[in-house]
Image: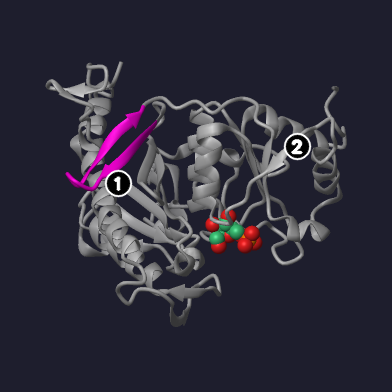
Amino acid sequence: MSATGGAGSFHGLPGLITIQQHIIANQRRHSEATGEFSFLLSGITIATKVLASKVRKAGLVDIFGATGEQNVQGETVQKLDRIANDLLMHCIGYRRSVGALASEENETVVDLTETGRAGKYLVLFDPLDGSSNIDVNIPTGTIFSILVRPDRSEWSEAGDVQAEILQAGVRQVGAGYVLYSGATTLVYTTGNGVHQFVLDPEIGAFVLVKERITVPARKKVYSVNEANSGSFPAEVRRYLDWTKTEAAGYSSRYVGSFVADFHRILMQGGIFLYPPTAKAPSGKLRLMYEANPMSLLIEQAGGSAIDGNGRILEKTPKKLHERTPLYIGSKDEVAVVEGFLRGKGAPAA
Ligand code: P6P
């Protein structure tokens, strides 16, 4: 049964449930919800529709390649990174319910309250994850995370949004991603299940294709960049050695674009690992706008996400751009890795 009552229909239009209708229907379940949240999400959908049209034309128009600049991460800024960041900043920032924006591309939080508004939502995003893959037409993605500004009584009296945004992932009120691939697909949660939409280019709308996605508890597929295995923790190397045994029977899939690897795992099961490496001793992926949103999604779908010591969602960030080791996917697959990380070795056959 879909959130709007029909079984995949809306006012008799078979199969046509747009994300806006779905969000509003979901909000009706939460009496305190206002239209603000659905209007905020529409900022994300508008920006990502425009971005999807640009990604599809990459190569035809001059959006390939780099801008020649470096971002706060020290990474080369691709032209499409800059376009994606500007689009999201404009479309989401336009919503008066948004008090601040944080992006992988911006060193500090963009405090919109300076423009005289007191929006309660804090929106964080990686505008175009995997952007180095653009020039070779490998899927890329936008990842977003939504928090709310804490009540003043919880924090320092002075409204310091740079501090207020540093909240654990369990406090997210929404999270999701858009994957730009053969199809452009949007997956989101507001804590009430995980739902998938596909952009129908003929009508320009994200249309519901799957509600309440659950990730299989077991799937013997691991996703890791094994070129880094020389500097992985010994327990991770022992896990990877075990997966290659006849008895374990695993296979490996790695796109090198987190949103693409994650989407495959959400749909089919498996596990994604980005352990600490010599080059990235705290892991490579960012806690606040990559690991947290994907961890909320995977837990809502029945999976799990850890950093090697505990739940990703319980980590309290110290810095906006801090990185974290990440083991995320099917519940039983994460449990197997956790067993190795705790020195217990392979699970009983
Ligand atoms: P590596 C892309 O640059 C990214 O941030 C993620 O999308 C991806 O999972 C990871 O880095 C790939 O990193 O070290 O395997 O190239």
What residue lies at 35% left-to-right and 65% top-to-bottom?
A: 85
Query: Tag on residue 120?
Result: 1
What residue lies at 36% left-to-right and 51% top-to-bottom?
A: 123
| Residue 347 % position (x, y) | 83, 27
Is 43 placed left or right of 13 in the picture?
right
Give the dominant element type of the magenta stretch: helix, strand or loop. Answer: strand
> In what element is the residue under mark 1?
loop
Q: Amino acid at mark 1?
A: Lys
Is 41 placed left or right of 165 in the picture?
left
What residue lies at 72% left-to-right and 30% top-to-bottom?
A: 335
Q: On the image, which quarter does residue 330 sit in?
A: top right
**Is residue 2 depicted above or below 337 in this figure?**
above
Question: Which residue is situated farthest in the bottom direction here?
Answer: 68
Query: Tag on residue 1?
Result: none
| Residue located beneath label 2 in the image | 337
Residue stretch in magenta: 195-210
Q: Quadrant of ligand 1?
A: bottom right
Q: Nearer the viewer, residue 104 or 173?
A: 104
Question: Which residue is situated farthest in the left direction here?
Answer: 11
